[in-house]
Image (cartoon, coloured by chain):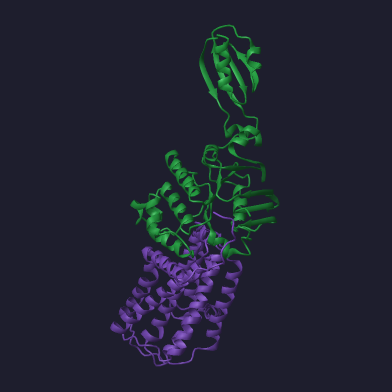
Amino acid sequence: MTGTALPAARRPGPAAWGQMLLAEARMVVRDTSGLIVPIGFPVLLLVMNGVSQDGDQVLPGGATVMNGIIMPLTVTMVAALVGVVNMPSFLCTYRKYGILRRLSVTPARPAMILAAQMAVSLAQVLLGVGLMAAIGALAFDVVAPPALGWALLAGVLLIAAMYGIGTLIAAVAPSVSAGLAIGLAAFFAMLALGGGLGPIANLPEALRAIGERLPYGAGNAALAAAWSGERPETLHLAVLALWGAVTGGLAARFFRWT
Amino acid sequence: MAAIEVEGLRKSYGGRAVVDGVDLAVEHGEIFGVLGRNGAGKTTTVECAVGLRRPDGGRVRVFGADPHRERDRVRQAVGVQLQQTHLHMSLTVIELVRMYRSFYADGLDPEGLVERLGLGEVRDTRYEKLSGGEGQRLSIALALVGRPRLAVLDELTTGLDSSARRGMWGLIEGMRDEGITVLLVTHFMEEAERLCDRIAVFDAGRVVALDTPAGLIGRAGGGAEVSFRAHAPLDRSLLTALPGVEEVSVRGGEVVVSGGGDLVKEVAAALMRHGVPATDFRTRTATLDDAFLALTGHQPEERDEQGSDEKGR
């Protein structure tokens, strides 16, 4: 070995990104229980609701109960489960076991693993929603939202908001179990106030106002509007965007790699 | 230009100086040992050297580059094995080696490396199912897969049984033979004495001595000791006059001669010359343990303790 200077810096290329993506995908697929929750649970809920309720009943907005209520609710649920429950649990585990620390002494950056993790969980969301849409279309007359563009925008903002909350939980949770507990508590609180446990109209006015300012309620309402062929309320889209921006910013500020 | 240069390094956690003015230089191609008890500042020093922690003061250069400002250049040339880190639990050995290979511009063939480190049989075993020794060999594989110029190994053999530990020693010597500079952090005296070309002895955040193993042993005044049972009257002055002899003591029928130099040969020749029959001839040469005790005032730790107090977050 000679004492010559180091060669110029070279950042990891596409092969490294591909390997990271593959690693995250394998981790998620091999953690079977983690996969059942975002993909199996909403399908189960959809089928249960579809069989037991009168999903064909037409709402005042023109959509059926299945399209106007059940689909928005379950799509929101998939995004919330993946973003707020699954992602923090993975990130807290990576941190606890020093996996991110080990990566940080290679030319790869821990941010690459975050990006890969997000890409893989996005695939879970799309898979969960796609499966629901397919089963719904075959068995329960589910149709694509008439206001498809608004539905896609609401979906993107919804996912951003849920990922933001999930990453913030991962940033502040002191342990893996704390991350999971906070994630589940946040999930059920948003679910209860966002219409997941019964019609929002049955909630007291104050709770309803809080619920629609949380990502679950806002996402649910925005998707329901899109399925009725309407433009979602600005309030709901703004709520989603704000939650995504604020929690994402805080997470970036407080996230610890080790 | 040395492989690693550390000058006046300081790092404190919560007002307590964990590293308090460390200077050292690791030369190309050597196995450089960082030896000390848990909490002596070894890991913190090494973590500053690989850019994992920012020093509070002082200067660190790796192949002349700042490990923070020129992170990408340094990372390509340094393979690291860290304490208390794990890998993706449900990935297999070969999947992990392939992934780490993809991070580096240059590197070794993952299949060949896995075979060479004796991991062929567990090639498709998940990380979470590996034994301690297999996990450590995998972490060596990941430290080597980018064909580094410098390998930094932190307590590589802690937690391993003695046969697995000896296996690791062979691997580390193999690295030096390939021209890789090795920085080895350890609290095992035997490991440091056997492997290292030079050793920095750490105590309370400082380097208290830096020398070859033989140099440290000699410097600490740790000479050899010869004892025997004399079966004829023996004049002490015969022995005290010998070159290198520092002390002669008689305990009952046993004579103990301590000192430096070629003590055994001198004593044996003197006994022959004067016709003194002797039995129970025993020799004890000073080891790094003696040197460590003399330099730091502490007994070396030989227990496998992971819980050092250096893990400030």
Of residues A7 and A87, the one nearer the viewer is A7
Q: Is residue A207 above or below residue B113?
A: below
| Most distant residue in the top direction | B233
Quadrant containing the C terminus of chain A is bottom right
Q: Residue at x 63, y 32 (%)?
A: B218
Q: Is residue B304 left or right of residue A36?
A: right
Of residues B100 and B148, the one nearer the viewer is B148
- The picture places residue B185, in percent across and down from the top left corner, at 56, 46
In the rendered image of the structure, the colour used to display chain A is: purple
Task: Judge whether residue A174 can be spotted in this image.
Answer: yes
- The picture places residue A81, in percent across and down from the top left corner, at 44, 71
Of residues A112 and B310, the one nearer the viewer is A112
Quadrant containing the N terminus of chain A is bottom right
Q: Residue at x 40, y 55 (%)?
A: B113
Please give the letter of the chain rendered in green: B
Q: Is residue B240 above or below residue B220?
A: above
Q: Residue at x 56, y 37 (%)?
A: B301
| Most distant residue in the left direction | A139
